[in-house]
Amino acid sequence: MTKKLSVFALILGGMVAFTGLFIIFRPNIRVTVVESVVDDVDVIPATPEPTLSPEEDPRFSDLDSNLLLANKKHPLPDGYIPEDLREMDIYTAGALCEMREEAAKHMEDMFAAALKDGVQLVCASAYRSEERQLSLYSGYVKEGGQDFADSVSSRPGYSEHQTGLAADLSYQVNEGFADTPQGQWLAAHAHEYGFILRYPKGKEDITGFDFEPWHFRYVGMEYAKDIYRSGQCFEEYFGLEGGDYK
Ligand SMILES: [Zn+2]
């Protein structure tokens, strides 16, 4: 009888202990799972090390390439002027807007498509020569010194506008443009015409530029769609060096 009781007590005690342990450890198991997911996300580096040198890959250094790179680490060759610039047949509110032939054609198609959706886009600035960039930049230096100039403008030779592949599609140059019908239409559709939002929000350390929801860069249809889907910026997508001046 005593033996039977102690066996029963042992079984009962075991069950209680098991239930207790289960209750204690089950939440821990869940927490562990959540933590491991967070750990996986954390493993992806925010600013990956560059793996490609633009000088060694003609896609980024060939002067005729749609992917010609101009950023704060990689200036264009001295005095570079694209050979196939032309004025575009789009609304500019009086500005002279020129781009390279292929980009110009796609920009015209994009403006027409936006208008069909009831959105009137405007081009405020497209190709800018090195001389024009020099006069803009010098003006800012006179106004507030070099640090101020660097915060609002590219140095001559370092501007993507000099490639003839980039355009500012707004006279409103602050983050608020992203919330306008034009800003929203461009963010959703520009890639369908070969353009990417070149300086996205959250990528400032990689591009070397603040968020510019009005600045679009031609890269060609296939790359534009793929870069858009990737959620990455230009430098990140190709593994190129970006960031601030050397
Ligand atoms: Zn721009």
Image (tube, grey):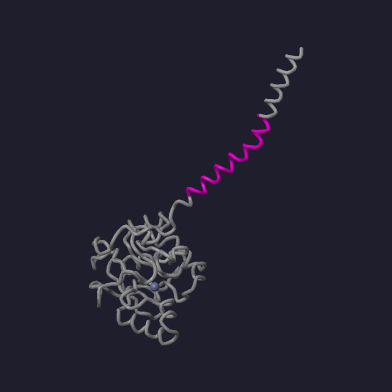
> Residue 56 location, x and y as percent?
24, 61
* Residue 111, visible in the rendered structure: no
Q: Is residue 193 magenta?
A: no
Q: Nearer the viewer, residue 228 or 40?
A: 40
Question: Looking at the picture, does residue 16 appear above or below residue 212?
Answer: above
> Residue 196 location, x and y as percent?
38, 63
Question: Looking at the picture, does residue 34 appear above or below residue 106?
Answer: above
* Residue 142, visible in the rendered structure: yes
> Residue 181 location, x and y as percent?
50, 67
Quadrant of the image where one finds ligand 1: bottom left
Which quarter of the picture shows residue 20? top right
Question: Looking at the picture, does residue 242 appear above or below residue 123?
Answer: above
Q: Is residue 40 left or right of residue 127?
A: right
> Residue 183 location, x and y as percent?
47, 67
Q: Nearer the viewer, residue 149 or 223?
A: 149
Q: Residue at x 30, y 82 (%)?
A: 131
Which quarter of the picture shows residue 144? bottom left
Q: Nearer the viewer, residue 217 or 158?
A: 158
Which residue ends up furthest to the right in the rendered image? 1
Q: Is residue 77 left or right of residue 90?
A: left
Q: Main secondary structure of the magenta part?
A: helix
Which residue ends up furthest to the bottom in the rendered image? 142
Total marks placed: 0
Question: Looking at the picture, does residue 77 appear above or below residue 231?
Answer: below
Q: Residue at x 41, y 87 (%)?
A: 142
Q: Nearer the viewer, residue 26 or 180?
A: 26
Identify the magenta region.
Answer: 18-40
Which residue ends up furthest to the front in the rendered image? 2
**Quadrant of the frame with the N terminus:** top right
**Quadrant of the frame with the C terminus:** bottom left
